[in-house]
Image (cartoon, coloured by chain):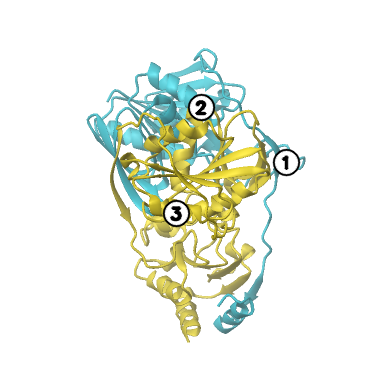
Amino acid sequence: MSKILVVAEHDGSSLNPSTAKCLSCAAEIPDAEIHVAVFADGGSDVAAAAAELQSVDKVLLINNAANHYPLAAVIAPQLVAIADDYSHLLGPSTTFGKDLMPRVAALLGVNQISDVMSVLGSHKFRRPIYAGNAIVTIEAPADRPLVATVRIASFKSVGAGNSAPVEQSSPNAEIPDHTRFVDLQAGKSDRPDLQSASKVVSGGRALASSENFEIIFKLADTLGAGVGASRAAVDAGYVPNEMQVGQTGKIIAPELYIAIGISGAIQHLTGIKDAGTIVAINKDEDAPIFEVADIGLVADLFEVVPELQAALSS
Amino acid sequence: MERILVGLKRVVDYNVRVRVRSDGSGVETDGVKMSINPFDEIALEEALRIKERGEANEVVVVSIGGTECEQQLRTGLAMGADRAILVTSQEPANPLTAAKIFLELATRESSELVILGKQAIDDDNSQTGQMLAALWGRPQASFASKIELDGSTAKVTREVDVGLETLDIDLPAVVTVDLRLNEPRYVKLPDIMKAKKKPLDHVALDELGVEPAASMTGVAFEDPEQRQKGIIVEDVAALVAALKEKGLV
């Protein structure tokens, strides 16, 4: 039987949607008891939210002032201190999990399985390599702790309605002070979060300026969609880095993805291949984005995007 | 500081579209163009800029693998690194083994800063830097888009999912770099000539006293599921109709 610990991602007050997706991966591992670890300063609201998620058997709340801001160097020794009880340690393949989990794996003396996209058995998983151009099946030794990050775009969220017990835990760990949080400049937006939005509108280099990106925002707001961008648009400074979709940005799986003025480099396509329906608007009919789009419109975006926005708002 | 270590991994070039071998035994790499992992090039560029600002005396580039990796190390020397170390190994190093190697080298070379790419574009693991920091018991600043050194500490800005996060870390430390940290310089012909005279030492994995970590080797390789090409619509009205039909608007 497997005993799985999922590390919750949160911002101190609310649980990140990545946690419910990690749980859905954990729940696919046969015959498993699943716990969630919440490392927080306070954190009772976050722990309560985790306890409501399906498939959770128990929530561990590790309440410590040092956990006020999630630093890998601070959380890793605490996680390692409780790792003995578990066969599997899972975290999301977000910048939080990608930073933390390898540090934990190294302290436990094992390699990590990065970006699990499907579960074939308790120690057998599939993951993408080469920007998703190949899929490899990995078999991990069953006699060692298994540390993995979960590619959240590959899993649906578990539902709520559970009421798992919440237990306080105080692992005996030495917490370093060599790493200090200074600040976080978060993009302020009332729009749906890019990684969990059911609809996403993205713009590319063809937008040509940050002022022009307004038409993307307008369309997104009409649809109630999140907003993304290609690497080219981010590199050109039209929009901030947290909006980048692709191999080195965010990997997303909305029901509807509208790519506007994006040619569709393989690195971008890697970030959207699990989307439900892909719509592409581009004036170059040979753009690779049309090879993967379910619906394509070959047109000048500056003409058709305002027209589309008007048609959808009426 | 005295010395910065930079890792240069030899990988299939960014522009090559890799294919899975027909027997599913791996990815076809025979006769394919090989290059320095693009993130590692950014790591080296940053180390060189730190040295050029007078904040470090020496930049040492390190690769792990067969003698073919000398090619990538020579490119690193041509970019401006002072010397190179090739850790010779028959097997490709997995992330934990690579982290152990860098730990041994960082100790031997008394390096106060190790700069690595945030991930290699072949296995996309994104583990080695964080693992090195763990084994070393030192700070890590992964996915860096800005590095400012200040004596025995550094301020590093990281690209995180919600925006930009800044950490203040003590040195020695490990930094892994993201795309927007800098734009690596082009190598000029005279620099290639000069690089041939720079030291490139070989050291075998067992000479370092590093015990390789168990690999989790792939048992099967397959092509990804391909999306099917869809329809092309003529105008906005047809697009809206198609979206309505799918119940998406």
Where the C terminus of chain B falls, by quadrant? bottom right
Is residue B176 found left or right of B13 in the rendered image?
left
Q: Which mark is residue A48?
A: 3
Kindly report which numbered mark, 2 or 1, lies closer to the viewer in this rendering: 2
Residue contact between numbered discs 2 and 1, judged by CB atoms under 8 Å:
no
Chain identity of mark 2: B
Chain identity of mark 3: A
Label 1 SS: loop
Residue B24 at x, y percent in the picture: 74, 40
Furthest-left residue in view? B151
Chain identity of mark 1: B
For disc 3, the neighbor class at 10 Å (few under 14, some 14 to 19, many from 20) is: some
Quadrant of the image occupied by residue A62:
top left
**Between A51 and B102, the one nearer to me in the picture:** A51
Which three-letter amino acid code belongs to the residue tagged 3?
Ala
**Residue at numbered disc 1:** B21
Q: Which mark is residue B98?
A: 2
Which three-letter amino acid code belongs to the residue tagged 2?
Ala
Separation of residues labelled 3 and 2 (CA atoms): 40 Å
Kindly report which numbered mark, 1 or 3, lies closer to the viewer in this rendering: 3
